[in-house]
Amino acid sequence: MSYTKFVAPLVRANSGNIRKLSVSSVRCRSTVASTKTREEKEQQQMDGCTVVEAAPVEVISQTKNVANSQLNKIHIDFDNTREAYKSKGNIELLRSLLVFKLCTFDILVDKNKELMDLGRKLLGKWMFEKLMKMTFYGQFVAGENHNTIKPLIRKNEAYGVGAILDYSVEEDLTQEEAEKKEMDSCVSEAEKESPGRDHREKKYKAHRQFGDRRGGVISARTYFYADEAKCDYQMETFINCIKASGGASNDGFSAIKLTALGRPQFLLQFSEVLVKWRRFFNFLAAQQGKSEMMVLEQKLELEQLKENLTQLGVGAKDDIDNWFTGEKLGLSGTIDLLDWNSLINDTTKISNLFMVPNLQTGHLEPLLNIFTAEEERQMKRMLQRVDILAKHAVENGVRLMVDAEQTYFRPAISRLTLEMQRKFNREKPIIFNTYQCYLKEAYDNVTLDVELSRRENWHFGAKLVRGAYMYQERARAKEIGYEDPINPDYEATNRMYHKCLEYVLEEIEHSRKANVMVATHNEDTVKFTLDKMNEMGLSPTENKVFFGQLLGMCDQISFPLGQAGFPVYKYIPYGPVNEVIPYLSRRAQENRGFMKGSQRERSLLWKELKRRLLAGQIIYKPAY
């Protein structure tokens, strides 16, 4: 069933007619491995985590892998500046050194927007844009439109580095404007009319003090809902990026955010429903004495489950018997979390999807008292936009990565992405979900989804990142009063990332149907991935493990990987100079932490520049 059909029924309240139980934000767990992605790219912590210095590696060389199928083991020397920067002219190296140095001055970074506004006024539009193209814009942005970015894309591809196009124009809102947009778009009509009367949890409600979702976030773009026309415009922008990516290469990627495609009220409400159903499953597992087991080991005895549900008053016995019928459901005599989730697949009424269990009363209750016809249309339209983008990705031979966002949106985003994967990943990996490894639940999320892909025989696709919202998430949890979802420290996040990555790599080794994007600027993580690939006999030419970094950052990682035959990609931002100022502002803030955390990239740039000057290469022009 299509994932659009799966949730398009999501909104009329009909508390009495519950044919099927709604699903939870649960994901399917597996026993195979995990992946890395490209989002770690930002700030070598890209997601708010600091850079870890890597131990030196051997030069690009190859030795026979005797253990497995005689594949060549590939070792990459990330200290070999000649290879790392052979695509850069001397002027480009000097620009990188200048920009990275400027990013270490707190006053310049803290006041970067004010300084850019002042520069625009003093220099005039033409001179300001010229100066930006010689510095920050030239370092982090590829050009103003699809045509002007082509030379850079061609040059990078000549050195083995692909492109993920990212139209980086952002709305420049004040904090007050952002808060107003968020509150208007996240509060339903029912909540406005009767605040506090619905069964809502505070984590999944909008709070004005955190209405500006840009706060504490420097490595991710934020979209605010204006109206349906704006969502259609943003969908068209994504479509243009998908088409451009398809035209630029045979195996391109494109990235989207679901908050750009519809009213976030839907994501909040659906997330809460999913979490409550997952919690209900945990409650039922505890009744059978299985609460301490690993997620997928919690197999509930079907007859006892039916009896418990009847005693709780969740439904009549005949109705409950109907829930657990189907070609496979319940045939083993037990129900696990994946079976539980599958109960939602045939839901046809939005009202049924928004019914949640009340553990105090034992009854199902509507999450909200009413949904307006307009709210229902908006929710369905969001699902239609997602479906349209997935179909364009298939038509253009482009893989579509769905970016992760805040944890109060995550369950809904992940579930909708999962439904897209079930529909579009049958023949090959088209849709990639993003897993934030700074979350305590990251490993469970990865393993559940991998296991579902194995049971249903579709291609699992993951992008592994550390996470971009750490400071905001912690502050919100503390102030509003719910458990901090983030791992306690950077080392715990690092361990989680490697644990998830290893799990996905093992799944690739096992079935060759899993795929992972290792999105990171962390050199140690890249080396960890290469070591595991060598151990498992995974060849880069299989195109199962991808690497990703941001344009203008960590070239000493991207280009050696590309020249050694690994599929590696740069996020390629583009857009008019004056309209990408918010993006450049974030890059400046991100690089402050990145450059203060490690002098490595600057030292390598200086090393290569000195080598060229001593070799008499005062004018160096890349050959490709």
Image (tube, rainbow, N blue to C red):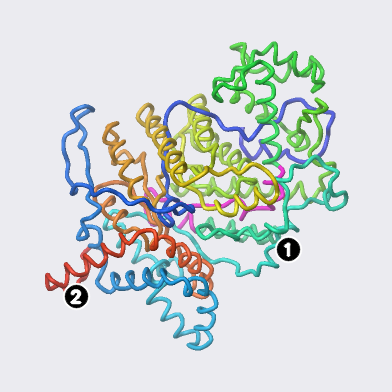
The residue that mark 1 highlights is 180
Depth check, front residue: 557 or 517: 557
In the image, farthest residue toward the right: 194
The amino acid at mark 1 is Lys
Can you say whether 8 is above or below 608 in the image?
Answer: above
Residue 593 at x, y percent in the picture: 44, 61
Residue 126 at x, y percent in the picture: 46, 85
Depth check, front residue: 271 or 389: 271
Magenta segment boundaries in residue numbering: 241-269
Can you say whether 590 is above or below 525 in the image?
Answer: below
The residue that mark 2 highlights is 619
Depth check, front residue: 521 or 373: 521
> Would residue 523 be counted in the magenta stretch?
no
Q: Secondary structure at mark 2?
A: loop
Residue at 37 percent across and 63 percent down: it is 552
The amino acid at mark 2 is Ile
Q: Residues within 10 Å of mark 2 (few under 14, many from 20)?
A: few
